[in-house]
Amino acid sequence: MALSQPQLVGLNSKMNQVFSLEEIESLCFDMGIDFDSLGGEGKGAKIRELIEFCRRRGRDEELVAKVRAERPQVAWPGASAGQAAASPAAGGGSQYNYSAHAGGGGSASVNNYIGVAPQPAQPSVGVTQNVGSVTGGTVIGVQIGTLNVNQPLQPEEKITILFLAANPKNTDRLRLDEEVRTIDERLRLAQYRDRFNLEQQWAVRTGDILDAMLRYKPDIVHFSGHGSTDGALIFEDASGAAKPVSAAALGALFKALEGVRCVVLNACWSNTHATQIAKDVDCVIGMARSVSDDAAIGFAAGFYRSLGEGKSVGKAFELGKVQIMLDGGSEQSTPRLKSRSGVNPGDVTFA
């Protein structure tokens, strides 16, 4: 049976987590697939294209079987709840089983083991009774009335994007509402739109930053607002007036927190912050100079539309700059992408 779209998305996510690019190449070789013919660059793109290649040719279950054999400890999408029961008993014993359909869409199995009874792969309800010796061997246990219920796949955890906006009352008005609306619209158009959850925090005061990070536990943090030429980002104080936050302070915040994989600083002169934060976060985007509202919104549109299609951060960054040009702008050199040491932005994906 072909995998469903949520299962394919889950397969993509798991493979990105547990396989290296070299292992993906070896996997292709074992399956008789030309690795070099798969489109894209980097691990994320190759995995996505491999899954799509197998899906189009009806080989998606073969791919799942292969990765499960390579990483049996991983809970792969599409695994059958009764799969382990179909395997020989551990310790070389023999297994005799009877299966029938059970109410509620599950299956009822009575398994008699001569040897050591294997542990069920899925949670089960049953009674094991020791009955002594029989001719020709020892019955270690008879497992009676085991109920293996085919549990539905757990939904993939969503990628949380936290949009932080600050436009203090004594600063120029920015079109922040248009920016977040554009991000939301582009994600809704994307193939993997259900993979993303956009959270918003407005008029962010310095005291709100840590609270928002702890509350939402974001994978991606997007700040939209003002930056200053001396390398500070402008948040708000308790009265709504401008309150600068240094690169060192934000860098310390992201160093102390875990789980954030990408930061977008869509604010003027934010490249200093990006450099600092990238010491501890995989990918960080900042602005090298002043940036107009049109360019900031255009970049965000192209960037998030591309992430929603499964593109890597590196590719989405390039397409965000392309969108600035498509909109008639000339500020495509303003966004700058930084990455943590040892991280290739072309390998970082979210769908």
Image (cartoon, rainbow, N blue to C red):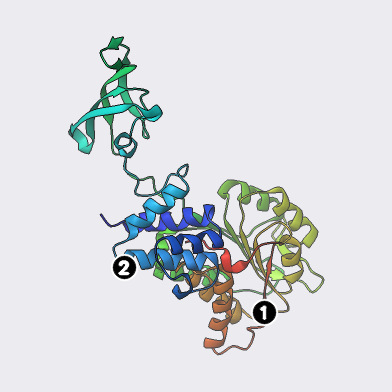
Q: Amino acid at mark 2?
A: Arg
- Give the left or right position of residue 178, taking residue 232 as reference: left
Question: Is residue 327 among the parts visible in the rendering?
Answer: no
Residue 304 vertical position relative to residue 208 in the rendered view, above or below:
below
Q: Amino acid at mark 1?
A: Val
- Give the left or right position of residue 190, taking residue 259 as reference: left
Residue 107 pos. (x, y %)? 22, 34
Q: Which one is earlier in the sequence, the residue at label 1 or at label 2?
A: 2
The residue carrying pointer 2 sits among few (fewer than 14), some (14 to 19) or many (20 or more) residues within 10 Å by Cα, namely few
Q: Which residue is located at x 63 percent, y 66 percent?
A: 344
Quadrant housing the N terminus: bottom left
When asked about the image quadrant of residue 189, the answer is: bottom left
Q: Which residue is mark 2?
A: 56
Name the foreground residue: 274 vs 71: 71
Residue 92 pos. (x, y %)? 37, 29
Residue 137 vertical position relative to residue 146 in the rendered view, above or below:
above
Residue 84 vertical position relative to residue 91 in the rendered view, above or below:
below
Mark 1–mark 2 Cα distance, whole angstroms, equals 43 Å
Q: Which residue is located at x 38 percent, y 49 percent?
A: 77
- Give the left or right position of residue 297, taking residue 33 as reference: right
